[in-house]
Amino acid sequence: KAGVTQTPRYLIKTRGQQVTLSCSPISGHRSVSWYQQTPGQGLQFLFEYFSETQRNKGNFPGRFSGRQFSNSRSEMNVSTLELGDSALYLCASSLGPAPGYNSPLHFGNGTRLTVT
Amino acid sequence: DQQVKQNSPSLSVQEGRISILNCDYTNSMFDYFLWYKKYPAEGPTFLISISSIKDKNEDGRFTVFLNKSAKHLSLHIVPSQPGDSAVYFCAASEADMRFGAGTRLTVKP
Protein backbone atom coordinates (compact mmCIF):
# COMPACT_ATOMS: atom_id res chain seq x y z
CA LYS A 1 0.00 0.00 0.00
CA ALA A 2 1.45 3.38 -0.96
CA GLY A 3 2.12 5.80 1.87
CA VAL A 4 1.18 9.44 2.20
CA THR A 5 2.59 11.41 -0.71
CA GLN A 6 3.40 15.09 -0.51
CA THR A 7 4.41 17.29 -3.42
CA PRO A 8 6.61 19.11 -3.99
CA ARG A 9 9.41 18.03 -1.64
CA TYR A 10 11.13 21.40 -1.74
CA LEU A 11 9.89 24.88 -2.55
CA ILE A 12 11.51 28.30 -2.52
CA LYS A 13 9.30 31.37 -2.60
CA THR A 14 9.73 35.06 -1.93
CA ARG A 15 7.87 37.18 0.60
CA GLY A 16 4.41 38.19 -0.49
CA GLN A 17 3.90 35.26 -2.83
CA GLN A 18 1.46 32.45 -2.26
CA VAL A 19 2.03 28.72 -2.30
CA THR A 20 -0.04 25.56 -2.63
CA LEU A 21 1.08 22.23 -1.20
CA SER A 22 -0.46 18.91 -2.12
CA CYS A 23 -1.08 15.73 -0.16
CA SER A 24 -2.37 12.34 -1.26
CA PRO A 25 -3.41 10.17 1.70
CA ILE A 26 -3.08 6.44 2.04
CA SER A 27 -5.75 4.70 0.01
CA GLY A 28 -8.90 4.33 2.09
CA HIS A 29 -7.94 7.01 4.59
CA ARG A 30 -10.49 9.77 4.75
CA SER A 31 -8.93 12.10 7.30
CA VAL A 32 -6.06 14.42 6.41
CA SER A 33 -4.25 16.64 8.89
CA TRP A 34 -1.59 19.29 8.27
CA TYR A 35 1.25 20.25 10.59
CA GLN A 36 4.01 22.82 10.51
CA GLN A 37 7.38 21.81 11.91
CA THR A 38 9.95 24.42 12.90
CA PRO A 39 13.09 23.95 15.02
CA GLY A 40 12.27 24.16 18.72
CA GLN A 41 8.49 24.31 18.15
CA GLY A 42 7.87 20.74 17.20
CA LEU A 43 4.79 19.95 15.17
CA GLN A 44 2.15 22.65 15.25
CA PHE A 45 -1.33 21.60 14.21
CA LEU A 46 -2.77 23.54 11.28
CA PHE A 47 -6.07 21.84 10.41
CA GLU A 48 -7.79 18.55 9.83
CA TYR A 49 -10.22 17.53 7.10
CA PHE A 50 -12.59 14.62 6.92
CA SER A 51 -14.92 13.95 4.01
CA GLU A 52 -14.15 17.36 2.49
CA THR A 53 -15.07 19.20 5.70
CA GLN A 54 -12.67 21.01 7.98
CA ARG A 55 -13.19 19.48 11.41
CA ASN A 56 -10.56 21.25 13.45
CA LYS A 57 -8.27 24.22 13.08
CA GLY A 58 -5.12 25.19 14.95
CA ASN A 59 -3.93 28.63 15.96
CA PHE A 60 -2.69 29.96 12.64
CA PRO A 61 -3.66 33.17 10.82
CA GLY A 62 -6.21 33.16 8.03
CA ARG A 63 -3.38 33.23 5.46
CA PHE A 64 -3.21 29.48 6.01
CA SER A 65 -6.08 27.61 4.41
CA GLY A 66 -6.79 24.18 3.07
CA ARG A 67 -9.29 21.99 1.38
CA GLN A 68 -10.02 18.35 0.74
CA PHE A 69 -11.37 16.84 -2.43
CA SER A 70 -13.84 14.01 -2.89
CA ASN A 71 -10.98 11.53 -3.43
CA SER A 72 -9.57 12.58 -0.01
CA ARG A 73 -6.58 14.36 -1.55
CA SER A 74 -5.87 17.64 0.20
CA GLU A 75 -4.21 20.92 -0.57
CA MET A 76 -2.87 23.57 1.74
CA ASN A 77 -2.47 27.18 0.68
CA VAL A 78 -0.46 29.95 2.28
CA SER A 79 -0.98 33.45 0.96
CA THR A 80 1.16 36.56 1.41
CA LEU A 81 4.15 34.53 2.52
CA GLU A 82 6.31 35.79 5.37
CA LEU A 83 9.87 34.81 6.27
CA GLY A 84 8.55 33.07 9.39
CA ASP A 85 6.54 30.68 7.23
CA SER A 86 9.74 28.86 6.33
CA ALA A 87 9.24 25.38 7.73
CA LEU A 88 8.64 21.74 6.99
CA TYR A 89 4.96 21.18 6.26
CA LEU A 90 3.77 17.70 7.05
CA CYS A 91 0.58 16.04 5.96
CA ALA A 92 -0.80 13.00 7.75
CA SER A 93 -3.73 10.72 7.06
CA SER A 94 -5.77 8.42 9.26
CA LEU A 95 -8.60 6.02 8.74
CA GLY A 96 -11.28 7.57 10.90
CA PRO A 97 -12.68 11.07 11.39
CA ALA A 98 -10.20 11.80 14.15
CA PRO A 99 -6.97 10.08 15.04
CA GLY A 100 -8.12 7.33 17.37
CA TYR A 101 -6.48 4.64 19.40
CA ASN A 102 -6.55 2.18 16.54
CA SER A 103 -6.16 4.80 13.85
CA PRO A 104 -2.87 6.64 14.32
CA LEU A 105 -1.66 9.33 11.97
CA HIS A 106 0.53 8.28 9.06
CA PHE A 107 2.81 11.04 7.87
CA GLY A 108 4.25 11.94 4.51
CA ASN A 109 7.85 13.09 4.17
CA GLY A 110 6.83 16.71 4.08
CA THR A 111 7.35 19.76 1.89
CA ARG A 112 10.27 21.96 2.87
CA LEU A 113 9.22 25.57 2.22
CA THR A 114 11.83 28.32 2.23
CA VAL A 115 10.69 31.93 2.05
CA THR A 116 13.34 34.48 1.07
CA ASP B 1 -0.39 27.23 23.83
CA GLN B 2 1.79 24.18 24.39
CA GLN B 3 -0.57 21.53 25.70
CA VAL B 4 2.08 18.85 25.24
CA LYS B 5 5.60 19.51 26.48
CA GLN B 6 8.87 17.69 26.09
CA ASN B 7 11.27 19.58 28.30
CA SER B 8 14.43 17.78 27.26
CA PRO B 9 15.54 18.76 23.77
CA SER B 10 18.18 16.04 23.72
CA LEU B 11 19.24 12.82 25.41
CA SER B 12 22.38 10.73 24.96
CA VAL B 13 22.70 7.13 26.16
CA GLN B 14 25.10 4.25 25.70
CA GLU B 15 24.12 1.31 23.53
CA GLY B 16 22.49 -1.43 25.59
CA ARG B 17 21.34 0.91 28.34
CA ILE B 18 17.81 2.21 28.94
CA SER B 19 16.55 5.38 27.25
CA ILE B 20 13.78 7.25 29.06
CA LEU B 21 12.00 10.02 27.22
CA ASN B 22 9.53 12.18 29.11
CA CYS B 23 6.47 14.17 28.19
CA ASP B 24 4.01 16.31 30.18
CA TYR B 25 0.57 17.50 29.17
CA THR B 26 -1.94 19.98 30.50
CA ASN B 27 -5.25 18.98 28.96
CA SER B 28 -7.01 16.39 31.12
CA MET B 29 -9.42 15.66 28.25
CA PHE B 30 -6.77 13.95 26.15
CA ASP B 31 -7.93 10.37 25.75
CA TYR B 32 -5.00 8.74 24.11
CA PHE B 33 -1.31 9.25 23.74
CA LEU B 34 1.28 8.25 21.20
CA TRP B 35 4.99 8.35 20.49
CA TYR B 36 6.40 9.03 17.06
CA LYS B 37 9.94 8.68 15.82
CA LYS B 38 11.43 10.89 13.14
CA TYR B 39 14.57 10.48 11.07
CA PRO B 40 15.99 13.42 9.07
CA ALA B 41 14.27 14.08 5.74
CA GLU B 42 11.41 11.72 6.62
CA GLY B 43 8.01 12.20 8.18
CA PRO B 44 7.36 10.95 11.73
CA THR B 45 6.47 7.29 12.02
CA PHE B 46 4.13 5.86 14.62
CA LEU B 47 5.90 3.92 17.36
CA ILE B 48 3.53 3.06 20.21
CA SER B 49 0.35 4.35 21.79
CA ILE B 50 -1.62 4.10 25.00
CA SER B 51 -5.22 4.76 25.88
CA SER B 52 -6.04 6.95 28.86
CA ILE B 53 -7.68 3.98 30.59
CA LYS B 54 -4.36 2.16 30.79
CA ASP B 55 -1.13 2.96 32.58
CA LYS B 56 1.29 0.83 30.59
CA ASN B 57 1.66 -0.55 27.09
CA GLU B 58 4.55 -2.65 25.89
CA ASP B 59 5.75 -3.52 22.39
CA GLY B 60 9.06 -5.30 22.20
CA ARG B 61 11.82 -3.01 23.40
CA PHE B 62 9.41 -0.08 23.75
CA THR B 63 7.18 0.57 26.76
CA VAL B 64 5.00 3.60 27.31
CA PHE B 65 3.90 4.57 30.81
CA LEU B 66 1.03 6.93 31.60
CA ASN B 67 0.57 8.68 34.93
CA LYS B 68 -2.75 10.48 34.61
CA SER B 69 -2.67 12.11 38.03
CA ALA B 70 0.68 13.71 37.18
CA LYS B 71 -0.28 14.26 33.54
CA HIS B 72 2.98 12.61 32.59
CA LEU B 73 3.92 10.19 29.86
CA SER B 74 7.21 8.39 29.34
CA LEU B 75 8.76 6.11 26.76
CA HIS B 76 11.30 3.49 27.81
CA ILE B 77 13.57 1.85 25.26
CA VAL B 78 15.42 -1.20 26.52
CA PRO B 79 18.00 -2.04 25.36
CA SER B 80 18.84 1.06 23.35
CA GLN B 81 20.42 0.53 19.93
CA PRO B 82 22.29 2.96 17.65
CA GLY B 83 19.45 2.68 15.14
CA ASP B 84 17.14 4.21 17.74
CA SER B 85 18.93 7.54 17.29
CA ALA B 86 16.22 9.91 16.06
CA VAL B 87 13.90 12.66 17.23
CA TYR B 88 11.03 11.36 19.34
CA PHE B 89 7.75 13.23 19.55
CA CYS B 90 5.05 12.55 22.07
CA ALA B 91 1.50 13.32 21.01
CA ALA B 92 -1.87 13.49 22.71
CA SER B 93 -5.31 13.44 21.21
CA GLU B 94 -8.79 14.58 22.03
CA ALA B 95 -10.50 15.88 18.92
CA ASP B 96 -7.23 16.44 17.15
CA MET B 97 -3.64 15.46 17.82
CA ARG B 98 -1.13 17.76 19.52
CA PHE B 99 2.59 17.17 19.54
CA GLY B 100 5.48 18.07 21.80
CA ALA B 101 8.59 19.82 20.53
CA GLY B 102 10.55 16.57 20.34
CA THR B 103 13.59 15.05 22.04
CA ARG B 104 16.65 14.13 20.02
CA LEU B 105 17.92 10.75 21.21
CA THR B 106 21.49 9.74 20.45
CA VAL B 107 22.53 6.18 21.20
CA LYS B 108 26.30 5.82 21.25
CA PRO B 109 27.90 2.49 20.27
Image (spheres, rainbow, N blue to C red):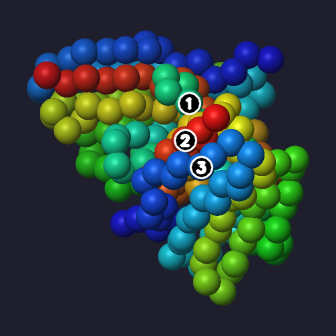
Chain to which mark 3 belongs: B
Q: CA distance from mark 2 to mark 1?
A: 12 Å
Instruction: Give the amino acid at mark 1.
Output: Tyr
Q: Position of residue A1 (x, y in %)?
A: 80, 17
Residue under the image location 78 percent in, 52 percent down: B78
Residue that numbered label 1 is attached to: B39
Q: Is residue A13 or residue B104 the one in the foreground?
A: B104
Q: Which label was assigned to residue B13? A: 3
The single residue placed furthest to the bottom in the displayed view is: B69
Q: Is residue A28 above or below residue A62?
A: above
Residue under the image location 40 percent in, 40 percent down: A37
Q: Nearer the viewer, mark 3 or mark 1?
A: 3
Q: Is residue B25 or residue A70 the one in the foreground?
A: B25
Image quarter hosting the C terminus of chain A = top left
Q: How many marks?
A: 3
Please identify the quarter of the rendering in which residue A95 is found: top right
Chain to which mark 2 belongs: B
Residue B92 visible? The answer is no
Q: Find numbered disc 1 in the image and state the secondary structure of the residue it sits on.
A: loop
Q: Is residue B91 left or right of residue B41?
A: right
Q: CA distance from mark 3 to mark 1?
A: 17 Å
Q: Residues within 10 Å of mark 3 (few under 14, many from 20)?
A: some
Label 3 close to label 2 by CB (< 8 Å): yes
Q: Find numbered disc 2 in the image and state the secondary structure of the residue it sits on.
A: strand
Residue under the image location 79 percent in, 58 percent down: B63
